[in-house]
Amino acid sequence: MRKKIFTLALAAAFMGLWSCEDDVVIKTGDTGILETVEGDYGGVKSEAGAAQLATLTVFGQEAATGHLFFELARPAEQDITVTLRADEEALKAFNAAKGTAYPMYPVGKVSLSQGGSVTIAKGQTRSAAVELKVAAGGTEGTTYAVAVTATTDKGVMLSASNSAYVYLVKPQPAIPDSKKGNVRTLCFVEVNDENILNMGEYTMKGSGKPFFDIVSIFAANINVDSETGRVHVFCNDQVSFLLKHADEFIRPLQAKGIKVNLSILGNHDESGMGSLSAEAAADFAKELKAYMDIYGLDGVDFDDEYSNYSDDPNPGFVTRSRENYCRLIYECRKAMPDKLIGVYEYTSSFKDSPTGSVEGKSAGELVDYMCYGTYQRYVPGREANMEGLTKAKYCPYSLKINDEYNGGWYGFDKANVEDAFDKGYGLQVFYNPKPQLYSYDRYFSAVSQIIYSDEVEWSGKYYTRTSATPNQGVKMGYESYLGKWTATSTNSLYVYIDENSTPRWWDWGGSHSFDVRIEEKVPGESYYIYGWGTYPEITSKYPCVAEYDPYDGSLNIAPQVLHEGDAEDPETWELRWGTYGTTSSYPAGDIRRFIWKAYTNFDSYSLGGVVNPKGVFTLYGIGGRYSLDTFHTVDGTLTPPHMDVKYHLSENFKLVKQ
């Protein structure tokens, strides 16, 4: 995905029992809050940066898991044994202080690993984590809570602000099965820009199941703490926002049957998937498990980019290798046997992918899938370079579907999807959707008709990045283009007289607008467009014809004859690609030498585009300073009607309905 991403830590800090309920805590390193009075103080905290009242979701009959630890204000002077326990009295105190009325989750369904007992070693400030298991047993639709407090054997006092940690617990139905065939669909969403809820608005016409099986939040990061040397998860503000609001953004997708993963990306330091020691890999896998459990995520996708690997690694790190990457995958599978584990790879050396085996398990056996990340390029057979990886677990043809790739159509070859399906590849990957720019139902249908023998429908709803409330969008279709529009060019050119009294073309006249009217020609097939371009006095009388393409939903204007000369008007008017130029009919220095020149060698190219969910569409041309405009033939040469216009409009055109 090769994109520079800077992040902030989403990590545990000192947030009290009575602290803000909806804060995701950013690590600051300030522990002074617990040292304002004499004595040894400590408190109960949650892993994965979870603030008070983080929600644990119980899906169906599956247990939910919290991860808790005890932290001291200063290093222990001797080994200290701490015992954590679920405490209903602490919850009552919380409710009384906050004016809430959360009922305690059934105590018989709550347990702590190791009996809740952990040790803080001499010289350390925190214990290892214990798991809080919350078994199925509550009532769906009810929000419960579990308060956890602690006692110690060495007279450590609980900080008044950290005397208990409270998780909310919400029972929900089991995640439905989204399986539609033998091919999984996965979409990586750049959450710095887009809302993952958009991916839940595409469903199969026949079965009603979601088109996407997996949506991956792109991306959190792997980083090393410069003080401790420990590798951990970092999340930027946008990822933190989603985790904090998991009930609003993650749970609705899961309720539809879509798995939601967290992507892990390198972040410009020594830590990376291929450089962790065995101990560091195991520790990082445990932290990832805490994120999966606490935020109710379904898996992790690794993308080994942007790490600054060292040839002289520091303690806790080893020289980068694919086998080390395999070790990390093994530790993740060991820690999270029920979670999805995916790998994104693209380099010619394969150094960004795992291979080899650990404890008799090959990389291909340990992962759920891998995908090739050079978009719109088809590489059948590449999976053989990852030990034990089968076609059923690989995507050799990942598709980038942002505006850079014209919503995915640029470089798309349906034959590659067909060939991959026929060969038995079991994953289709999409990257970087722009759901406010494109409605993808036709594009996804081009794929789904091959892999599922079914079409994709769009609900007509779209979400802005941080909103859980949908907007009603415009569905793309023949009727979408009818009506009156204001068209605005991205550029324009004009002739001016310079300081030496010499006429010259100036190639940046800015954007200019004009009005057009689009009417029906052949229903469902074509249109008349009145008033197009630089010479509306011609095109308002002789409209150009545009074709509707039902395959991708686009409107397209090709070079054409607007009017054949007749008795009423003997001139033949044409629409051709043109740009600035000169003619030899006039001497140098004569302004009439500067003309808008036609190029018939581009007659096979169209000006085309699609209406977006906001009801706006952009017509894209052939680039440069070219545009489709009006010409007639004078002395055997295609010539513009006249040059008595200030600006010649060019390049692309954005149309907004009036």
Image (spheres, grey):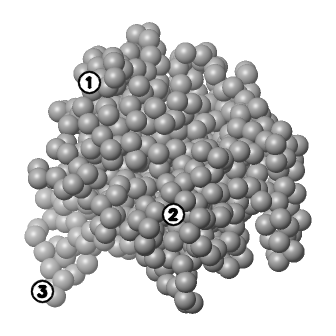
- For label 1, the crowd category at 10 Å Cα-Cα, with few meaning under 14, some 14 to 19 and many 20 or more, is some
414 or 486: nearer the viewer? 414
Residue carrying label 2: 80
Label 2 is placed on what type of residue?
Ile
Whether tag 1 and tag 2 are in contact, CB under 8 A, the answer is no
Residue 548, horizontal then vertical, whole percent: 57, 35
Element on which disc 3 rests? loop
Position of residue 121 in the picture relative to residue 531 (left or right)? left
Q: Residue at x 25, y 78 (%)?
A: 496
Element on which disc 2 rests? strand
Residue carrying label 1: 356
Residue carrying label 3: 500
Q: Residue at x 76, y 51 (%)?
A: 169
- For label 3, the crowd category at 10 Å Cα-Cα, with few meaning under 14, some 14 to 19 and many 20 or more, is few
Label 3 is placed on what type of residue?
Asn
Label 1 is placed on what type of residue?
Gly
Residue 232, horizontal then vertical, whole percent: 40, 56
Q: Residue at x 20, y 45 (%)?
A: 318
Whether tag 2 and tag 3 are in contact, CB under 8 A, the answer is no
Q: Is residue 137 visible?
A: yes
Tell me how far mark 1 sits from mark 3, CA to CA. 72 Å
Tell me how far mark 2 sits from mark 3, CA to CA. 88 Å
- Which numbered circle lies on residue 389? none
Q: Which image quadrant for residue 6?
A: bottom left
Q: Which image quadrant for residue 442?
A: top right
Tell which circle, 1 or 3, labels the residue nearer the N-terminal end: 1
Q: Which image quadrant for residue 68?
A: bottom right
